[in-house]
């Protein structure tokens, strides 16, 4: 990787699911960087009546909101488009109609303003957020926990990811959301479960801990969800608070057990001792605290972005854009949005389409 100490100012756009977001970030790897603006509009109210994200509604809302949010993010940053170095947008993975709206907008802006485009992988944006906020050096062990993913990854640089383990069925956020639906406590499920769990007893409801003690870093959450369905079938047997607390504890126990294996493997592979947890479920305090404790016990430095930068936002997309711009990796306007796009497919260099000389502002 070439790298440079040039400071980039990048406009980021995020529309992969139900958050419409635009942000302007200024900085250079390894970070930390300055967030000049960070505007997020959560479509929760639009989707609430349906108990989950409706793809068509999400895409339509992104179209209606995005122009305004981009203008607002530039306004708050007190910058014009001419003063931006590049436009970065989430190009996947995510709901395809939703991703498409953000990516098309970014392409139009890049074309009209004559700026380079960076097509950002949403998972890479989550993965690199702790560099934006804390300047975490490479390599680090990443636990990526979101609505669609749950994986341990060794991160050596942008595009350099080695998968240690992932879920063999449901994603961790999906488990929170489905449990919340069973309890009829609303959407999105994660924050609702966490709130209820605070008032419950985690020992009340016996729930399984799938995969415990296995010699790998894979996860499974489907059995846990089925057990919650059984426990809640008989109305009034357990309080919602106790189910929420017991579920959350089971999830924490599973993650900590799998983390022990991932930490050991990372220790075998690298001299560095750093763990980062990122993604929407990293907003869960019980999980953050348990991972922080385990990391301390194992001699690992622990970092997780502040709560608002764990859930979907455009500052992390702008930052991923800076990391790629600094390596002179830009994308062509023909880049197609991707519904599925694993981190391991981000081979550095394979997407090198255009080199922008450092002196060419
Ligand atoms: O990263 P994110 O905002 O969107 C995706 O890329 O998926 O993650 C959303 C997921 C949802 O499943 C949501 O329920 C979960 O993150 N989540 C939480 C919490 N806040 C959000 N899960 C547990 N506890 C939370 N406090
Ligand atoms: Zn996300």
Image (spheres, rainbow, N blue to C red):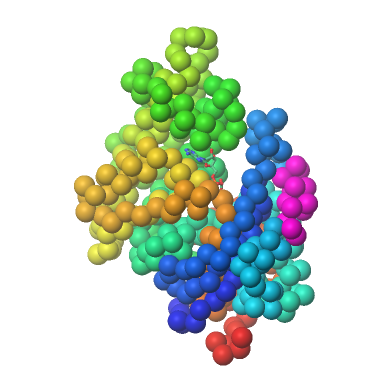
- The front one of 185 and 72 is 72
Q: Magenta part of the protein: which range?
A: 56-68
Query: Residue at image x 53%, y 55%?
Result: 123
Give the image location of residue 336, x and y in percent.
Answer: 70, 63
Vertical placement of residue 5 versus 71, above or below: below
- The front one of 158 and 311 is 311
- The front one of 154 and 129 is 129
Query: Residue at image x 38%, y 58%?
Result: 154
Give the image location of residue 161, x and y in percent.
Answer: 44, 61
Location of the N terminus by quadrant is: bottom left
Query: Residue at image x 39%, y 62%?
Result: 134
Vertical placement of residue 213 versus 117, above or below: above
Give the image location of residue 113, x and y in percent.
Answer: 73, 76
Query: Residue at image x 64%, y 78%?
Result: 83
In reply to whether residue 254 is colored magenta, the answer given is: no
- The front one of 85 and 156 is 85
Magenta region's main secondary structure? helix
């Amino acid at each position: 990787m070439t790298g440079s100490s040039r400071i980039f100012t990048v406009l980021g756009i995020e529309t992969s699911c139900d958050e419409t977001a635009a942000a302007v970030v200024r900085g250079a790897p390894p970070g930390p960087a300055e967030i000049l603006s960070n505007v997020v509009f959560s479509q929760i109210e639009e989707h609430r009546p349906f108990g989950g994200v409706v793809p068509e509604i999400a895409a339509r809302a992104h179209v209606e909101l995005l122009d305004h949010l981009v203008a607002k993010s530039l306004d708050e940053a007190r910058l014009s488009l001419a003063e931006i170095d590049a436009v970065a947008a989430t190009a996947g993975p995510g709901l395809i109609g939703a991703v498409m709206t953000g990516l098309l907008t970014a392409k139009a802006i890049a074309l009209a303003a004559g700026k380079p485009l960076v097509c950002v992988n949403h998972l890479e944006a989550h993965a690199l957020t702790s560099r934006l906020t804390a300047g975490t050096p490479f390599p680090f062990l990443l636990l990526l926990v979101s609505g669609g993913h749950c994986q341990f990854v060794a991160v050596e640089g942008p595009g350099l990811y080695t998968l240690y383990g992932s879920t063999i069925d449901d994603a961790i956020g999906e488990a929170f959301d489905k449990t919340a639906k069973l309890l009829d406590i609303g959407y999105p499920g994660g924050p609702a479960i966490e709130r209820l769990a605070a008032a419950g007893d985690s020992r009340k409801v016996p729930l399984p801990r799938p995969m415990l003690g296995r010699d790998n870093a894979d996860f499974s959450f489907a059995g846990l969800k089925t057990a919650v369905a059984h426990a809640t079938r008989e109305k009034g047997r357990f309080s919602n608070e106790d189910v929420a607390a017991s579920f959350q504890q089971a999830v924490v126990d599973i993650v900590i057990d799998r983390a022990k294996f991932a930490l050991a493997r990372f220790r075998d592979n690298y001299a560095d001792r750093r763990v980062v947890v990122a993604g929407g479920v990293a907003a869960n305090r019980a999980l953050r605290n348990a991972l922080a404790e385990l990391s301390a016990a194992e001699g690992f430095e622990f970092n997780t972005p502040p709560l608002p930068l764990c859930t979907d936002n455009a500052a992390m997309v702008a930052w991923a854009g800076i990391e790629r711009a600094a390596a002179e990796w830009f994308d062509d306007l023909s880049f197609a949005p991707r519904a599925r796009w694993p981190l391991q497919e981000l081979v550095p260099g394979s997407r090198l389409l255009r080199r922008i000389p450092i002196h060419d502002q």
